[in-house]
Image (tube, rainbow, N blue to C red):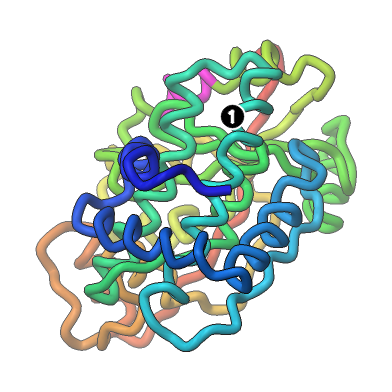
Amino acid sequence: MLPDTDELAEVLLDLSVPHEDVNDLVRMGRRVTDDPELRGFLERSVDELVRGMGEVGGPVDLPDLDWASGPLQRCFSVYVFVAALPHTRAYHRERGIPADVSRHTLADLGRNMAVHRRRHGRAGVQAPWWLIHHFRGELYQLGRLQFERARLGQRAGTRLAAAGIDVGPDSLCLNVHIPDFRGPMSPSAVDRSLALAREFFALHFPLERYRVATCHSWLLDDQLRKYLPGDSNIVRFQERFRIAREDREPADTEPVQFVFGDPELPIESLPRGTAVERAVGDHLRAGGHWYIGHGWLPFEKNA
């Protein structure tokens, strides 16, 4: 199910896997294909991943490799995604997804591994569950932002319906995600992403009507406005969204993770080099908490 040695190295580079990890992954790949137990586990994992390809929110339960901890255990999902890649690309071709969108979307595997190495100093996949969305045709990178085909939950759907929007619980929506290692989130970049998304989903998913886009992120915590200038990229991003609901469960590790790279860093030693670093760290050191913000915006052009 895996490409041969030479082709595997090329596929890993196409997926933006960090260069320092490629040789070890190729070497361990031979072990996976030569071991009947590992090969069988890989086949079952790929079958689970690609079943119902393209379904919005289809349940996927990738089993964990019952293997001694080590590089193979940390990286096994790489082989699952590589083996599933022909299925993903076939689905993209069926939908007419442009090659550059497909490439940029699936390169999130490499980004995820870069996040793992930044946090732990060794090879691994930080969040295999997250990449399931990419390789099942549910999520697409369009410019600066990612857009995930999803459905509204009970609370958000009920609240939006009460606000007069023609949606309800389980209605289709697009979840907006802000990936790391993509440069500033400038207003022009966000405008371009939204414009690309409106064109993209109308063209490639014409039977799916997306009336709203939602975002669930610490970047929507309105406490940031106390620390950042009104023309900052984050505040400008917040201004695009209307509140869907409030979350009163502290999520302090979220900004620490995304701003500083490691959610376990001690608060007292967080750097203060940028305005965002000072905002996150100073607020926590003063005894405050950060929360996930839940916002929505009209997605249809005429809404």
Identify the element where label 1 is drawn. Answer: helix
**Label 1 crowd (10 A; few <14 / some 14-19 / many >=20):** some
Residue 255 at what x, y percent from top left? 38, 67
Q: Is residue 15 magenta?
A: no
> Which picture quadrant has residue 289?
bottom left
> Which picture quadrant has residue 284?
bottom left
Mark 1 belongs to which amino acid? Arg
Residue 237 at what x, y percent from top left? 43, 39
- Find the magenta span and give its range: 190-196
Q: Residue at x 60, y 83 (%)?
A: 66
Residue 213 at what x, y percent from top left? 65, 36
Label 1 sits on residue: 89
Q: Is residue 215 left or right of residue 55?
A: left
Q: Is residue 195 magenta?
A: yes
Residue 233 at what x, y percent from top left? 31, 40
Residue 125 against residue 79 in the figure, above or below: below
Q: Residue at x 70, y 18 (%)?
A: 94
Would residue 97 be visible to someone looking at this image? yes
Q: Is residue 165 left or right of residue 82?
A: right
Would residue 235 be visible to someone looking at this image? no
The majority secondary structure of the magenta stretch comes to helix
